[in-house]
Amino acid sequence: MSDIDVIDDLTLTRATDDDWDDIIAADARAFAMRNPLADDERDDLRRKVADDDVVVVRDPSLPSAPLVGVSMFYRMSMTLPGGAQADAAGLSWVSVAATHRRRGILRRMLSELRDQWLAENQTFAILTASEGTIYERFGFGPACFAHTVQIASGAQLRAAPPAAAQVRFANADEVAAAIPDIHRRWTATRPGALARTESWWTPILADRSSERPPAASGLHYLLHEDGYASYRVIKDVADGTVRAEVEEVVAVTDAAHTELWRVLASLDLIPTLRAAIPVDDPLPAKMIDLRAVEVTGHDDKMWVRILDIPTALTARRYRGGLDVVLGVEDRFAGQGGVFALTVSDDGIATVTESSERPSVRLDVSVLSSIYLGGLSARGFAAAGRLWTDSDATLDALDRAFSTAHAPFAGTFF
Ligand SMILES: CC(=O)SCCNC(=O)CCNC(=O)[C@H](O)C(C)(C)COP(=O)(O)OP(=O)(O)OC[C@H]1O[C@@H](n2cnc3c(N)ncnc32)[C@H](O)[C@@H]1OP(=O)(O)O
């Protein structure tokens, strides 16, 4: 890592206070935002990221040396299969000016950050991707998915309502006091779940009007002792129709999940609800008519890149015994190699570098995709992107890497 680097006639540095006006303007252009971040949103962002974790590229050959590239990462924490929490570098706000595309600025910025992550012994990098074809070349694989669902108002749950209400609408103070802890309890139950520190909660709880979708209300909160839900009411300006966008349903128990959805599905004068839910969410199975939960979209929500393969493989738990030799290719970060992975019947792994012939071959992006249990080894084998020496090896690999719950990040970054 260096303080200043030259790519042809460009300079690459870490951000300082003086760069932030240009960073905000550049990202607003690159992400087609109607307005750049307002001052309070910019303060929120700066509380979440250190200037030393922000890479800035400028072109001094042009008047005023415009900022032509920016990338940053948050220091985040993610739940692994089995419940351990691991640090993860959350890559975000990556952009290159439209005037300077396709001359290697993204590759150069990611190389700089890769060198930093390796020097810091980071095990994982994660991101939410704007397009599906950019990040595999850097070793990232799609790892967490969500279903977008639409639910008609009045949809009935099978379970009879409890005698006494267990859910109530809560005011801002009650919400601020209760939900960070419920969220923390929830993260322990889901692989891929991202923890939120205070600097992440501040903008969520502030619910700034500048951050709301057009024609959207503020957040309404429903509180249960083991869960919460939030939603906005949106009136379509074009046709006047009303719907609710469910922002979050965070339930630590099945009972909390049922009671929160019971209330959401019965909101008056709101014909339609939309939500993004885990792909294995039990909601359809809880309805009298499973068609009441219509899946309208399926999106990759978080990508993972394993940076330290032995540490990552030993940090998670597995669902069955396994004895394989993984041959992993990593063209971007050079962290691949051959690793003997042995998992005991109780799901605990030991990993050693090996000189044996691999029984499984795959790219680090594929290993990263199956790591949280969101995609299967068998699926990649069928796509010709993972090779095993036998079907029995594939079966064992598939079973060991699968998880009881589909991974779900729960926080956009
Ligand atoms: C984590 C996040 O922040 S996701 C958000 C990403 N940012 C955006 O979508 C904002 C709008 N887009 C942009 O700012 C730019 O087009 C970027 C950042 C996507 C690409 O920046 P560039 O500097 O043009 O990329 P660069 O020239 O370094 O290309 C690197 C590689 O990615 C490939 N690539 C770049 N953009 C794309 C794309 N949109 N689709 C597919 N491949 C792409 C290039 O072909 C190149 O491949 P190679 O090195 O294997 O030959």
Image (cartoon, rainbow, N blue to C red):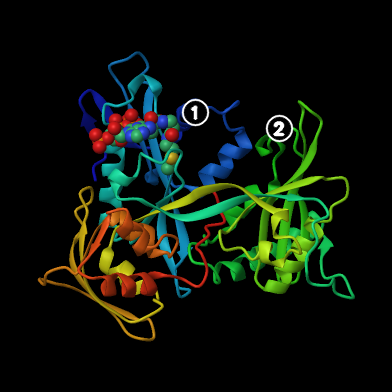
Residue 21's disc is 1
N-terminal of the two: label 1 or label 2? 1
- Mark 1 closeness class: few <14, some 14–19, many ≥20 residues within 10 Å: few
Looking at the image, residue 353 sits to the left or right of residue 181; the answer is left
Query: What x and y, as percent, mark residue 362?
Result: 24, 58
Query: What x and y, as percent, mark residue 33?
Result: 56, 28
Name which residue type carries label 2: Pro
| Snapshot quadrant of residue 210 | top right
| Snapshot quadrant of residue 135 | top left
Q: Which is in the foreground here, disc 1 or disc 2? A: 2
Residue 101's disc is none
Q: Nearer the viewer, residue 196 or 398?
A: 398
Name which residue type carries label 1: Asp
Circle 2 SS class = loop
Ligand 1 falls in which quarter? top left
Residue 12 visible in the picture: no
Query: What x and y, as percent, mark residue 119?
Result: 25, 56
Ligand 1 lies under 8 Å from the Cβ of mark 1: no
Q: Nearer the viewer, residue 382 or 380?
A: 382
- Mark 2 closeness class: few <14, some 14–19, many ≥20 residues within 10 Å: few
Ligand 1 lies under 8 Å from the Cβ of mark 2: no
Q: Residue at x 28, y 54 (%)?
A: 385
Q: Residue at x 65, y 68 (%)?
A: 181
Query: What x and y, as percent, mark residue 13?
Result: 31, 36
Q: Residue at x 58, y 52 (%)?
A: 147
| Callouts 1 and 2 close, C-beta under 8 Å | no
Looking at the image, residue 155 sits to the left or right of residue 75; the answer is right
Residue beneath disc 2:
214
